[in-house]
């Protein structure tokens, strides 16, 4: 037992001796560069933004970007980013640029040195990994930099970096020295980064790329210009219906409860912002995007969600990257759960609610003051008190609905609803007039006269709406004539289904298919039966089924007619006269059966034949233009006559004042 205990003690002493010699060791696997490059900066915009930021910290005045923008990325394509900053020496490349994870601010300063005639800049870089951003879109990065007349030129190979098991040994990764490395040159200072063996699968849209770069960087100004294929990038705001503050390129100052300062602006578009990624607030830190557009995790409610589709803005909050770095590695999000960031998130939620309330009020007022709504509100001022109050409340309710935008044809839905409400309210007088008329006794002459006067107004308003609509249709029909729409089926169908286009007195006439069939059978014309390939009749009959019938033929606008068409229509008319006036029962006989040919030109030499048939009361010939002009004039004259029956200052007539011939 004693021997056993002694052996145990000796074994433990040996173990302690061995433990005192053990050393722990951390290695950096090459796979880490996949996370720091490819996965952190996937996409041309975020990757190249980091290179632009490096140029800014190098006190460059200009950055030139060369992009391949043809249909597809070819194996030989490259992206080049060149700047006129102070460049780097060989020693600086090794000790600073190639030191992954080096915090520039802790080793140097929060501010750059004055250079190139520029004042000091607040340093953007901090994490020391932006140099790897190029690996997000390329397998090879070529860096050529000039300082004090000497060139430092080397290459970084993504495959070599990620193939290595670790970089913990003394040598680490050795970038490849390239052609003119170490040579002296008269080239101006600056750095050129060339990205080759590109991983991009789709072509780059140059215009969209330029806009996205501008969205990510506030630093672009008169002292720092970025060119994309020789075209400068500019920060231009989209047109806003409402902006706070009102002036373009201005910012509002604010202070958080933790006394941290910030600047912001917000804008609401007149229509929904089509690209969802452009909605919300971008948060910038030191002039660089730190949070992609968002709404500070605010849900918004029903109306709020709708209003957010119109809202965009920007916030500058440099305190997120001062003593504590709250910017996520991918430069796209902020660590909002940190106590330093929480006050900004809460401010953002309050501010968005406030902005949505302001937007709702301004939008309501804008709708109320639109020309059409203002017109109806002015007319309503002369309505009876009760109707006026009801209409005003309806307008307020309609204009207060944020979801009412424009329809597919660009018309404001609120305008149409207000017009509908006005017409519905005034037309309600129909029932009121009938009730008042029924309630009046035969001896109450004054009341009876009052009701009849009101009835005249009601009748006029509804008639005027009908005439106005017809005039608009006639004008649209004229456009079809100018465009020379084929006479069949468009033109013929239009006239057949709307006889008042020929004559306002023809409103009561209807298409008589039975008469069409009689003519088709008599002249052995294949009548349409709905089967595919059946021949379409080149005429149609209109009638009132009792006294009148018209055989109408339409020809293509600008088309030529002659003796053949005249004789054909004459035969149709003579046949119907015999059939309906001689064979039919006396009570079904038609007293008037005539033809109408709508055509624009008569063949030379056939004019006399046409005139004889017209004089014999067989048919009329009208051109398309004369037909529509005469119809439009008749409708206008009809409206003028009706207008004389009531007072011209009645508000219900004002919105019909544009009906003219």
Image (cartoon, rainbow, N blue to C red):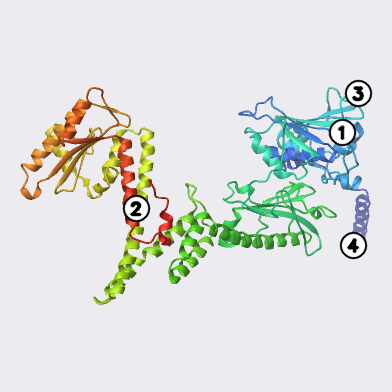
Q: Residue at x 60, y 62 (%)?
A: 361
Q: Which comes before the other along the chain, label 1 or label 4?
A: 4
Tell whether 432 sits left or right of 69.
Answer: left
**Residue at disc 3, secondary structure:** loop
Instruction: Report, in whole angstroms, how far the alpha carbon at label 1 lies from the one at label 4.
Output: 76 Å
Tell whether 233 sits left or right of 622.
Answer: right
**Residue at disc 2, secondary structure:** helix
Q: Residue at x 75, y 39 (%)?
A: 133
Q: Position of residue 80 (x, y in %)?
A: 75, 30
Query: Is 153 or 506 nearer to us in this picture?
Result: 506
Q: Is residue 76 above or below residue 395?
A: above
Q: Position of residue 380 (x, y in %)?
A: 46, 64
Q: Which picture quadrant has residue 451?
A: bottom left
**Residue at disc 4, secondary structure:** loop
Instruction: Report, in whole angstroms, how far the alpha carbon at label 4 lies from the one at label 3.
Output: 82 Å
Q: Badge 4: how crowded within 10 Å, few (<14), some, or many (20+)? A: few
User: Residue beneath label 4, please?
Assistant: 1
User: Residue beneath label 3, please?
Assistant: 184
Q: Are marks 1 and 3 in contact (CB under 8 Å)?
A: no
User: Residue beneath label 1, please?
Assistant: 87
Q: Badge 2: how crowded within 10 Å, few (<14), some, or many (20+)? A: some
Comparing labels 2 and 4, the label whose residue is closer to the camera: 2
User: Residue beneath label 2, please?
Assistant: 640
Q: Which comes before the other along the chain, label 1 or label 3?
A: 1
Q: Which comes before the other along the chain, label 4 or label 3?
A: 4
Instruction: Report, in whole angstroms, how far the alpha carbon at label 2 lies from the one at label 4.
Output: 131 Å
Q: Which comes before the other along the chain, label 2 or label 3?
A: 3
Q: In the picture, which quadrant includes the N terminus?
A: bottom right
Q: Position of residue 213 (x, y in %)?
A: 71, 40
């Amino acid at each position: 037992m004693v021997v056993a205990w002694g052996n145990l003690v000796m074994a433990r002493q040996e173990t302690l001796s061995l433990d005192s010699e053990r050393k722990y060791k951390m290695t950096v696997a090459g796979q880490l560069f996949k996370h720091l490059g490819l996965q952190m900066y996937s996409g041309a915009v975020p990757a190249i933004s980091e290179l632009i930021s490096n140029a800014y910290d190098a006190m460059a005045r200009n950055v030139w970007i060369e992009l391949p923008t043809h249909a597809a990325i070819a194996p030989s394509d490259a992206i080049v980013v060149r700047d006129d900053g102070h460049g780097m020496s060989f020693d600086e490349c090794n000790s600073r640029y190639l030191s992954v994870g080096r915090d520039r601010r802790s080793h140097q300063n929060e501010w750059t040195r004055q250079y190139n005639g520029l004042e000091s800049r607040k340093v953007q870089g901090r994490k020391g990994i932006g140099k790897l951003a190029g690996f997000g879109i390329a397998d090879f990065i070529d860096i050529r930099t000039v300082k004090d007349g000497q060139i430092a030129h080397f290459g970084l190979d993504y495959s070599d970096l990620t193939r290595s098991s670790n970089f913990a040994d003394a040598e680490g990764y050795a970038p490849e020295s390239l052609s003119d490395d170490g040579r002296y040159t008269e080239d101006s200072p600056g750095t050129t980064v060339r990205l080759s063996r590109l991983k991009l699968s789709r072509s780059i849209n140059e215009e969209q790329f330029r806009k996205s770069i501008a969205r990510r960087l506030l630093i672009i100004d008169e002292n720092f210009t970025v060119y994309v294929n020789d075209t400068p990038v500019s920060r231009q705001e989209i047109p806003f219906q409402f902006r706070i503050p009102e002036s373009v390129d201005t910012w509002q100052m604010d202070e958080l409860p933790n006394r941290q300062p910030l600047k912001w602006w917000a804008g609401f578009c007149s229509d929904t912002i089509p690209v969802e990624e452009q909605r919300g607030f971008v948060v910038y830190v030191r002039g660089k995007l730190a949070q992609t557009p968002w709404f500070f995790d605010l849900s918004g409610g029903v109306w709020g969600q709708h209003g957010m589709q119109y809202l965009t803005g920007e916030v500058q909050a440099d305190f997120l990257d001062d003593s504590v770095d709250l910017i996520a590695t991918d430069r796209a999000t902020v660590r909002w759960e940190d106590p330093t960031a929480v006050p900004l998130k809460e401010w953002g939620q309050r501010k968005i609610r406030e902005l949505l309330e302001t937007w709702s009020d301004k939008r309501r007022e804008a709708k109320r003051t639109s020309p059409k709504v203002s017109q109806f509100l002015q007319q309503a001022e002369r309505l009876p008190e009760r109707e006026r109050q009801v209409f005003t409340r309806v307008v307020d309710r309609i204009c207060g609905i944020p979801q009412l935008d424009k329809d597919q044809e660009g018309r404001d839905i609120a305008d149409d609803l207000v017009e509908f409400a006005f017409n519905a309210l005034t037309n309600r007088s129909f029932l009121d007039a009938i009730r008042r008329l029924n309630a009046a006794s035969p001896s109450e002459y004054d009341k009876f006269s009052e009701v009849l006067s009101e009835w005249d107004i009601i009748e006029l308003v509804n008639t005027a709406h009908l005439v106005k609509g017809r005039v608009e249709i006639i004008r649209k029909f004229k456009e079809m004539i100018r465009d020379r729409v084929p006479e069949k089926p468009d033109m013929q169908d239009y006239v057949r289904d709307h006889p008042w286009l020929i004559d306002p007195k023809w409103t009561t006439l209807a298409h008589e298919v039975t008469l069409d069939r009689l003519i088709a059978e008599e002249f052995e014309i294949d009548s349409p039966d709905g089967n595919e390939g059946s021949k379409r009749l080149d005429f149609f009959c209109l009638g009132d089924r009792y006294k009148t019938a018209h055989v109408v033929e339409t020809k293509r606008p600008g088309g030529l007619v002659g003796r053949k068409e005249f004789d054909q229509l004459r035969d149709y008319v003579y046949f119907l006269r015999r059939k309906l006036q001689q064979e039919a029962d006396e009570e079904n006989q038609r007293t008037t059966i005539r033809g109408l040919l709508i055509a624009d030109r008569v063949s030379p030499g056939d004019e006399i034949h046409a005139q004889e048939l017209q004089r014999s009361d067989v048919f009329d010939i009208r051109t398309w233009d004369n037909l529509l002009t005469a119809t439009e004039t008749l409708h206008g004259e009809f409206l003028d006559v009706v207008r004389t029956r009531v007072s011209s200052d009645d508000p219900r007539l004002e919105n019909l004042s544009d009906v003219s011939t």
